[in-house]
Image (spheres, rainbow, N blue to C red):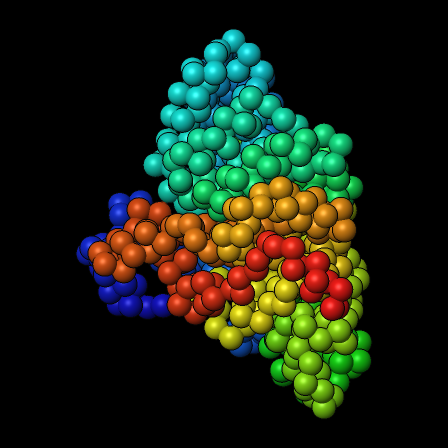
Amino acid sequence: MDTTEMRTRARALVDSPALTYRQRVAALAALAEESLDPPKVSAACEDALASGLVDDLAEGHAPYRPRYLLPDYGLALRQGSEFLGLPAPTDLYEAVAFLLSAYSQVPSITGYPVYLGAVDALLEPFAADVDDDTLRRVLKLLWVTIDRSLPDAFTHANLGPDDTRVGRTVLALERDLLQTVPNLSLLVDPDRTPDDLVLDAVRTVFACGKPHFVNHRMMTGDLGPEYGVVSCYNSLRLGGGSHTLVRLNLKESADRSGVDAERWLSDVLPEHVALTAELMAARIESLVEQARFFEHSWLVDEGLVHLDRMSAMFGVYGLAEAVDVLVERAGGDGHYGTDPEATALGWRTVERLAELVGEVSLPYCEGNGGHPFLHSQSGIDSDVGVTAGTRIPIGQEPGLLQHLRAVTPNHRWFASGVSDIVHFDDTAVRNPQAVVDVVRGALASGMRDVTFNLDSNDFIRITGYLVRKSDLARLAATGVARHGSDVLAAGSVANSHVTDRVVKRVISSESASRAAG
């Protein structure tokens, strides 16, 4: 970018009537970063990036903060913070003020904190001294302030797996406030999470599309007891995070290979995994060795984040189209998600990816034994004609049971996150306990994350974050959005047709469709 172009683009941002002050500052910072040289990679890697085989998700040319950080807020509450100039809180009011202060100083790729902690576990000890009405009023102030001061739907809070007053109050507030921020996950453990808490959460989804339901037993098996769910549905170790998220376009990989499935899996995929890993390594080294983030962060100084708990995320997307390309090349016409053989090829591809990514060594990734985490990446607003992660294409989803059976075998391989969205109509509202059974059954059968939404409320689940239909209408009418994520959502609605998901019914005929196979 030459100086003239940079000045022209900067002027356009400064003068734009569509940007809030913070959005304008963020855009100007990104423009300045774009003027720097990106981390050096090989010519083959540069070509993979330029041609769309590999995608750095526009993280910027000069990494100066990790993509995702999961500070240990529990430790911060116990010890206080010299950087924030705050002692350890002694009551609920001080604890809430402490957390809000801490959140404002946690960086991420979005410019806002992507992880707010397990707020029920963090605040429950302070809730013992207040009555229910006071607890509700204080938590309402917290929740409203989060939405107004961190206006980004990738900001994510966790609840569960245990039943608490704070957790129940948060769910009740979500039903009343109807906010997209924060994103929310309920960690579900079959022995610790009671059915009526899951039912409470299901009814909350009916109102506002939240929370996700996360398989706590599977997560602790992969990441240990200290982990968190951040941003869309990404799971990482507490006190660590992910330096970067780079993704491999499986559709593009299969398209350009020109070979059959066997050769693609054995010869082509390893080459493309290596190119993706090369870009990841270059970005990580730039962040750690050149920008030296971990040498001058208050989070590191105070023991809330540790470099040896960090890793990186190896994303994949377009599995459905890659499978369809390979099936068609072999003379078939089956599709991933609906045809058994095509779906099985999808499972085999994911297992092969897990094998290859497990062999990749990356610097400063001790949080996963020196390897990246395989991640089913949920797509971005500019994706056209390629399906998010390992999902079944929108509009082609089969019935509920077949849908879950098609995607569940993939979930075991994605310790850092995978999501398949189920879209219900109002029959779910009339049968909430049946939805609890669906959630319980899906988690028991091996799903890592269960996410559903309702076609009749104001909320659309985009990738892993939410947008309100009313906010999209306001954005279309005025060109302005208080939540920056609304702009991304508008692109996803236009390009990925996320409002066209096949609607599923929760009625007794589901068992009939099961019998029919």
Q: In the picture, which quadrant includes the N terminus?
A: bottom left
194 vs 47, nearest the viewer? 194
Instruction: Find residue 513 and report its image quarter.
Output: bottom right
| Camera sees residue 516 | yes
Residue 142, position as x, y percentages in the image: 41, 27
Q: Residue at x 53, y 24 (%)?
A: 166
208 vs 118, nearest the viewer? 208
Q: Is residue 251 left or right of residue 345?
A: left
Q: Residue at x 75, y 73 (%)?
A: 340
314 vs 506, nearest the viewer? 506
Residue 192, relative to residue 180: is it above or below? above
Q: In the picture, which quadrant includes the C terminus?
A: bottom right
Residue 92, relative to residue 308: is it above or below? above
Q: Residue at x 62, y 37 (%)?
A: 198
Residue 308, relative to residue 461: is it above or below? above
Instruction: Find residue 348 and report its image quarter.
Output: bottom right
Residue 359, relative to residue 74: is it above or below? below
Q: Residue at x 38, y 25 (%)?
A: 141
Residue 81, position as x, y percentages in the image: 51, 20
Q: Is residue 222 left or right of residue 16?
A: right
| Camera sees residue 33 | no
Query: How many numbered circles does the render carry?
Result: 0
Residue 447, position as x, y percentages in the image: 71, 51
Residue 216, position as x, y percentages in the image: 70, 39
Residue extending furthest toward the bottom? 331
